[in-house]
Image: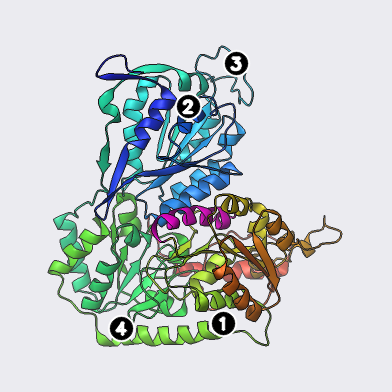
Amino acid sequence: MTTETNTIQLTTAQAIIRWLSNQFIEIDGQELRVCGGGFGIFGHGNVTCLGEALHTVQDELPLYRGQNEQSMGFAAAGYAKQWLRQRFMFCTASAGPGTANLLTAAGLAHANRLPMLMLCGDTFLTRLPDPVLQQMENFNDPTFGVNDAFKPVVRYWDRICHPAQIIQSLPNALATMLDPADCGPAFLGLPQDVQGWTYDYPATFFEKRVHRIRRQTPDIAEISDAVAALSNASRPMIIAGGGVQYSKAAEELTAFAEKHQIPVVETIAGRANMLATHPLNIGPVGVTGSDSANAIAEKADVVLAVGTRLQDFTTGSWTAFAKDAQFVSINAARHDAGKHMSLPVVGDAKLSLAALDATLTMTAPKTWLESAQQARTKWDAYVADNVSHGNRPNSYAQAIGVVNELCEPRDRVVAAAGGLPAEVTANWRTLDVGTVDVEFGFSCMGYEIAGAWGARIAQAEQEPDQDTITFCGDGSYMMLNSDIYSSVLSQKKMIVLVLDNGGFAVINKLQNNTGNDSFNNLLEDCPTIPQAFGVDFVAHASAMGATAEKVANPTELGMAFQRAKSSDKTYVIVMDVDPYEGWTTEGHTWWEVGTPHVTDNESVREKHLEIEATRAKQRRGV
């Protein structure tokens, strides 16, 4: 109700939702709501007030009913990735365990620098009914509860203790989510009584506002230092990270590399910055990389890192590069730009590449590029053989090869924790820019299906005729599969490849590679399981409304995939793969894992010494 001409009386919950529905963003000349809607599971902490407010804006802010709060957060992350962080979804959960279930998803969004807004129930501010259902009492600090656990895994946190607070808090939360340097999840704790309290809000607070993503211009002195370093390079290399896509700088990066004839390698997050066929694309780098990219990485004297946080799978725990290599890091975030004694260029990737290009005159030696391209040719031959099938056991790589051959260039491919991120990174040949989402920032099992559902919701808003394809191991499927049901209910079709190797096979591989016996990873190696048996994934997926079938080999997989492409609803294809054979064995750099310094197991001791011997290559830095 309107109390005066310049104020509007609303509950806190109503005001939050009204404000959200009036925030827009300009994308390529088009104005869209910056919040695409939300994912929600209602409980006593959010249904009566926030639920009432959301009911009135169903068309403006569609609310997708999730099956699990963690998967809702994963779906929101997949949505934000598809929209290149320009739009986000909110997640709402009840007080207590519903909200606690979002913690892992918040960690994923934080690690991957993704926007996500959490509107979560909280206990009563008055404390009059304490202790309430699902309240986590802290005997010595009554202000401290479950919601405080989110502080380490979000970029913005607030507890709304008075309705007027949102006038400051909501713009601050949105500014954080849209800031390229500080992007990440935002959390608002909403006490159940405060959600329903009213306040006379200024009418201007709810006026339409159009936002734009900031593009930070790099410092002239930092550009000058970077130009000087690159000008003196005899073996330069570019690492293209996920930030290249978020800046929409893929064309600028390609043009820069072409002009200066510098070979490019990709991180996991930057896996689709260049087409596989581009002559300057030398392949993925690091632990899950390629022989070709890692071969030039260890020889490069100047490394231009663009839009990457240089995590250990990219750097081989900092053994993939020469110890005296000079890093130049372009990044919107100061924290990432200065890693490992890099010459920092703090700024937007698109603008920073243009600024570098304006004064850089060097061209990489022809012999350096030719050696990189020769290495890439050998790697392509290895991949071609690796994905081929015939008289060998079924493998992840074969399934990847089949899908790669039959999918459309703009179809989106999703993978997450387990063995599939490595196999997709190494074996997938990019058909179009920005079409691969390998979630390896937080390496979250369960993201595969939920993240793909969120990506499909966003993809339906952009490219409705394209498919979202997710590769999922049996372990991840068992951990979080309920968004198959969500996708069927919401009519957001996905193609789900379930590759069953009888347990957690990639960790079993790591266990064996460090000298340990197989134990508690593959079902057959669990001493508490008297007799292992496989799950009927076809029956399970069918029970959730999907079309599902099991195939015996990659040839049948190809035929099933074509049926899935023609289907109008979520389609699940199951294939058994060998847990021991068929792994991509080439292209790996050293990766630091903790191994026992003292053991009675001789094979473990030998592997420990072998692993530690490689540590001599490790760069020292911060």
The local crowd at label 1, few if under 14, some if 14 to 19, many if 20 or more residues have their Cα within 10 Å, is: many
Q: Position of residue 407 (x, y in %)?
A: 50, 73
- SS class of the residue under badge 2? strand
Q: Position of residue 67 (x, y in %)?
A: 61, 44
Look at the numbered discs 1 and 3 and tell me whether their residues touch, using CB distance below 8 Å: no
Look at the numbered discs 4 and 3 and tell me whether their residues touch, using CB distance below 8 Å: no
Classify residue 435 as left or right of residue 359.
right
Question: Is most of the magenta stretch helix, strand or loop?
Answer: helix
Classify residue 159 as left or right of residue 501.
left
Q: Position of residue 434 (x, y in %)?
A: 39, 65
- The residue under label 2 is 190
Q: Which mark is residue 165?
A: none
The local crowd at label 2, few if under 14, some if 14 to 19, many if 20 or more residues have their Cα within 10 Å, is: many
- SS class of the residue under badge 3? loop
Q: Quadrant of the N terminus?
A: top left
- SS class of the residue under badge 1? helix
- The residue under label 4 is 369
Could you give the CA–CA distance between mark 2 and mark 3, rounded to whole angstroms? 16 Å
- The residue under label 1 is 386
Can you say whether 235 is above or below 63 in the image?
A: below
Q: Earlier in the sequence, mark 1 or mark 2?
A: 2
Could you give the CA–CA distance between mark 1 and mark 2, rounded to whole angstroms? 52 Å
What amino acid is labelled 4 in the image?
Leu
